[in-house]
Image: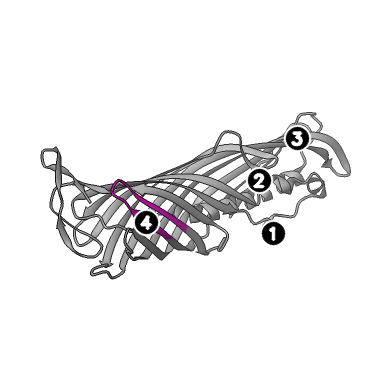
Amino acid sequence: MNLELVQAGSASPNPNLDTDFTNMMGWMSGQLANGLGFNAGETFDPPREVTDRRIETDLSLGIGNMPFNKSQFPQLDQSLQAVGIENFFPNSVLFPNLTMHLRAGLPWRSDFAFRFADMTTPSSYRLSNSLTGDGQSNSIGATLRKHCFGQDGDPLLTFAANFNHVFGHFGYGTSFSGNLPTGGSQSASVNENVSGNLGWNVNSFGLNAIVSQKFGAWIPFVGVGYNYVTGLVNAGLTAIDSSGNLGPIQGAATSGPAASNGSVIFGAQLNRSWANWFFNGEVEAIGPDKGQAWIAQTGFSLPFYIGKSGKAQDQKGSDRKNPPLSLEPGGVIILQ
């Protein structure tokens, strides 16, 4: 972790409070980095083969939980403890997630997908009772999968190699009043307007193994994932005293995520003639937030492929001729 103390001020800034703000941002950036590291590794693909030279899409909406470990919160000046500044920060953050895959079939029972995800907080989103903010995070990535077995009613085993890049920003603000030291034995009554900013760029390289089994229209699945994570999260915090008794208090820090994390993956897909619905969950099993960080989502994939006509192989391994419906020269929609 690289901590950077930012000194600024005009009227009597207190260096000790600058140090406290820097230490708080070290905690904040570290907690966020670990949460984003797990979030970046989430790459779920519905357990469904895409036949060679076919294209399929899916769309999902989810929610995730990012814990903030208050037991690691730094020790602060008694004056900051008195105004309860620790309580301004959340114990955890729930975040929305909208994800889309565009998947293409490849030879040898494999497929390739591009992934796009968006996380935008609602207007005046609250991290805690007294802390509001707004921000956005996006991710782009790719997945290469290989399918094994799954014939004659046997379970399907799918291996996947994933890459995701997550980038975004978040701004937040609050206020507090109290007596803060101005240096030495002096103190002053202040009304502090607090603003902060966060920014991140995180990369995740992962491997997944998923086992699925078809039971009529249902395909339940379970698996594990491992991710190697790199990147940085920057955090800054500034307090301005509207009464003018104390100069600005500022701190900033930069942290990186834990390099390794792993997850348990589970869910099910329901195949229908007009849409294939799925839901899934991931829980962190290896890493600093194991058992606490999780992601859940639900969505649908289209029940047809777009591509050249030919033979498709279902999960039981039986070949069947696809009924073609021409879209353009050389292209068809193939109903399943």
Q: How many marks?
A: 4
Q: In the picture, which quadrant includes the N terminus?
A: bottom right
Task: Give yes or no for contact between labels 2 and 3 (Cβ–Cβ under 8 Å).
Answer: no
First in residue order: circle 2 vs circle 1: 2
Looking at the rendered structure, the secondary structure element under dot 1 is helix
The residue indicated by pointer 1 is 71
Marks 4 and 3 sit apart, C-alpha to C-alpha, by 52 Å
Measured from the top left, where is residue 323 in percent x and y?
15, 48
Marks 4 and 1 sit apart, C-alpha to C-alpha, by 39 Å
Q: Inspect the image, locate mark 2, and give the three-letter code of the amino acid beneath it.
A: Leu
- Please tell me which residue lies in front, 109 or 324: 324
The residue indicated by pointer 2 is 5
The residue indicated by pointer 3 is 192
- Mark nearest the camera among 2 and 3 is 3
Residue for point 16% across, 43% down? 332
- Mark nearest the camera among 3 and 1 is 1
Q: What span is in magenta?
A: 267-281
Marks 2 and 1 sit apart, C-alpha to C-alpha, by 23 Å
Residue for point 74% across, 45% down? 85
